[in-house]
Structure formats: C-alpha cells, structure tokens
Image: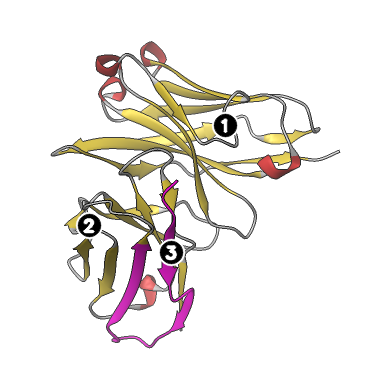
Amino acid sequence: DIQMTQSPSSLSASVGDRVTITCRASQDISNYLAWFQQKPGKAPKSLIYAASSLESGVPSKFSGSGSGTDFTLTISSLQPEDFATYYCQHYRSYPLTFGGGTKVEI
Amino acid sequence: EVQLVESGGGLVQPGGSLRLSCAVSGFTFSDHYMDWVRQAPGKGLEWVGRTRNKANSYTTEYVASVKGRFTVSRDDSKNSLYLQMNSLKTEDTAVYYCARTSSSSGHWHFDLWGRGTLVTVSS
C-alpha cells in the first residue's frame, strides 16, 4: 500500500497568513493526488485533484503543486473560514489512502 | 439540488450486520463511480470501497480490512448506493460517508460528499 505522510500535523496561523502544507507519498504517484478540507462535525470538501486542478467553485486562494512523491497545498491568504483540517489522498492504485491530516488553527 | 444523503446507521453488536444507503439526486448517478469513506471518532479519513459504473461492469474494490465482510452495490434505477456490512467489529465504528467520483482527463477523483451516517459497533 502507498503511505501518505502529511506535515506538519498541526499549525497555528493568523488571518492573512500564507500557509503551506506538505504531503509525501511512499512511492511515485505521478500527479494522482487530491486535497480535502474538513471542518469539525462536517463532511469533507474536495479542493484539488490531479495535484493542482481546482474543483469547481473552490476559490483561487487554494493552490496545489508537486509530482512524484512530494506535494504541497498552499492557502495564499488565510481567512477565518479556512481554519480546518486538511487531508491529502492518492488515487494512483488501490487501496486509496489518505494522509493523517493537518489541523490549521488560529 | 445536487446531493448525497446517507442513512441506515445506528448501534449494532459485534458480529452483527447493517446496511447503509446513499440516496443521490441532482446528477446522472449512472455515469459515476461511487465510494464509501469512513472516519472513526477523532481519527482521519479511511477509504472503504468503490463501485464502478455500468460502463465498467459495476466492478468493485475494497480496502483489505473490510474485504469479505463489506459489499458495495448500487441500483442505478433508484439512484442509490449501498454498503452491506457483515461480521461487524468494534473497530468499524465510524461515520460513513458516500462520495461521488468523477473523471477528468483520466483522473477519477472524489468531488462530492454526503453528510455521513454514524455506525457504532458495541455490546
């Protein structure tokens, strides 16, 4: 199975900050990577697929990059509604697996 | 309105069975792969299983921990997805989400999620 490792597991930031989250795959997954946002008690929301393509309706302050084993999610200017937990997920092969999550706190 | 609505969760004893449903509306259900993803209390997300669409023969995939115990199925005529869970274990306790999978240039990615239904396995 492909293991997905996110770092950091949590971070503290302020409104207006630029935030970067890293995700590393245990083997080459090309660009078969997605990112999700989840707020407490809510369902996940899809943000990015194919490492850098925004899902419909997702604001451009979110961006993704990377290929192979190393990927990043960047939030250009953190807003109050962005405080949440973010997960990466590969879909290169089965089983599909998620990273452990990064909690973005105030 | 485009939405996925799960139902069927509840309390079940270890070794018991439960069937979850996901009712879909607002899009052409039969075009999409559909998945189940779960989240144990206070933990991260875990993919459970997938059913492909008719064009791909409704074939299924599962994570190893549920293979042989869980079955993902669908009824395109009812716009519904199902998860039959047998031989339940305490570690299956989680919120279960159904998720729509869409294809974009060969990338089959989750793009829509339901609100989830809680399954508690306990004696």
The image shows residue A87 at horizontal and vertical percentages of 41, 60
Q: Secondary structure at mark 1?
A: strand
Q: Nearer the viewer, mark 3 or mark 2?
A: 3
- What amino acid type should be assigned to the residue bearing mark 3? Thr
Q: Which residue is mark 3?
A: A5
Which chain letter goes with mark 3? A
Q: Are marks 3 and 1 on the same chain?
A: no
Q: Quadrant of residue A96?
A: top left
Q: CA distance from mark 3 to mark 1?
A: 32 Å
Residue beneath the point at 49% across and 73% down: A9
Q: Is residue B67 above or below residue A19?
A: above
Tell me which residue sits at (81%, 40%) in the image: B122
Residue at the far front in the pictured view: A27
Amino acid carrying mark 2 in the image: Ala
Which residue is denoted by mark 1 in the rendering?
Answer: B7
Q: Position of residue B53 (x, y in %)?
A: 31, 20
Q: Are marks 3 and 2 on the same chain?
A: yes
* Residue that appears at 50% across and 52% down: B45
Left or right relative to B3: residue B121 = right
First to last magenta residue range: A1-24
The crowd level at tag 3 (other Cα within 10 Å; few <14, some 14-19, many 20+) is many
Q: Nearer the viewer, mark 3 or mark 1?
A: 3
Q: Nearer the viewer, residue B91 or B123?
A: B91
Q: Which residue is mark 2?
A: A51
Classify B88 as above or below B71.
Answer: below
Residue kind at label 1, given as amino acid type: Ser
Q: Quadrant of the N terminus of chain B?
A: top left
